[in-house]
Image (cartoon, helix red, strand yellow):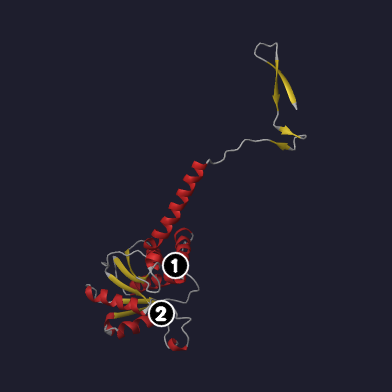
Amino acid sequence: MKICAPDSAGSNAKTVTSSRKCCGLFERRESWKLTWRGRAVGFLVGAGLVTGFFLGIHPFLAVSDPPNGDVFVVEGWIHDYAVDEAVKLFQQGRWQQVFSTGGPSVNFGSTLAEYDSYAEIARDKLLTLGLKPEQIVTVRAPARERDRTYASAVALRKWFQDHSIKATSVTVVTIGPHARRTRLMYDKAFRGSVAVGVVSVVNREYDAARWWRFSEGVKEILSESFSYLYARFFFFPAD
């Protein structure tokens, strides 16, 4: 469709072409597209982000703090070699007791069916590694289908309350990329009343520096990444 409009002098007419065609069913619009330079910059930025994720995500998740808490805690589900590292750390420190935490033991089969919880499994490992019975406090958490780390932390908090223990800081020994989520869950469980530190024992099932080359590393990193995001932004416990 063409529209005639007068020019500035009022004597001549100039033609303006409408962008609408075919009874207004189609219209022409201008669009921006990346040049080859723009595509190159976009590729470099994307490659940098991917590289940063691959190199930085494991150190971010497997965080370790100085082990200077008043209370020394071992998560009961960790591997034997991690418990061994925890004992070495405990013996080097100033702690008098170690708290083993965890809920009911599942998926262990008949070999460990005698144990009632991960906390008791850890206690047995600690005894085997040379600690005395009076040095170990077993804190059993209730059965939970999810958020088991949080349930263990709440059980420990309630144990402190029941025994009138006023801790100002705790050090929790865990394994690999689970560390950051452990610290977050304990902080939520104690409602910010204590300073929470974690010690991450290296997971020996894969090379942490090249985790993406191992199926176990990929599974753990992806699982812990999504679990941490959930715990950080969508987990609001009432207890």
Q: Residue at x 62, y 35 (%)?
A: 30
Amino acid at the residue labelled 2: Tyr
Between 161 and 97, the residue placed more toward the observer is: 97
Task: State the residue lying farthest toward the right.
Answer: 23
Q: Is residue 12 left or right of residue 192?
A: right
CA separation, marks 2 and 1? Answer: 30 Å
Q: Which mark is residue 51?
A: none
Which residue is the site of mark 1? 213
Asked whether the beta carbons under mark 2 and mark 1 sit within 8 Å of each other, the answer is no
Q: Residues within 10 Å of mark 2 (few under 14, many from 20)?
A: many
Q: Residue 77's image quarter?
A: bottom left
Count the numbered circles shown.
2
Q: Give the answer, above or below, for where 31 lies relative to 168.
A: above
Element on which disc 1 rests: helix
What residue type is disc 1 on? Answer: Arg
Image quarter in which the C terminus is found = bottom left
* Image quadrant in which you'd find residue 1: top right
Q: Earlier in the sequence, mark 2 or mark 1?
A: 2
- Percent position (x, y) of residue 94? 22, 72
The picture places residue 83, in percent across and down from the top left corner, at 33, 77
User: Which residue occupies the foreground of this view, 220 or 66?
Assistant: 220
Residue 164 visible, this orientation: no
Which element type, helix, strand or loop, lies under badge 2?
helix
**180 over 34 or under it: above or below:** below
List x then y, in percent, for residue 85.
30, 75
Give percent across and percent down for residue 237: 46, 64
Packing grade of label 1 (10 A; few <14, some 14-19, many >=20) is few
Figure check: 54 above or below 74: above
Which residue lies under the disc numbered 2? 118
**Which-is-in-front pick, marks 2 and 1?**
1
Q: Is residue 82 visible?
A: yes
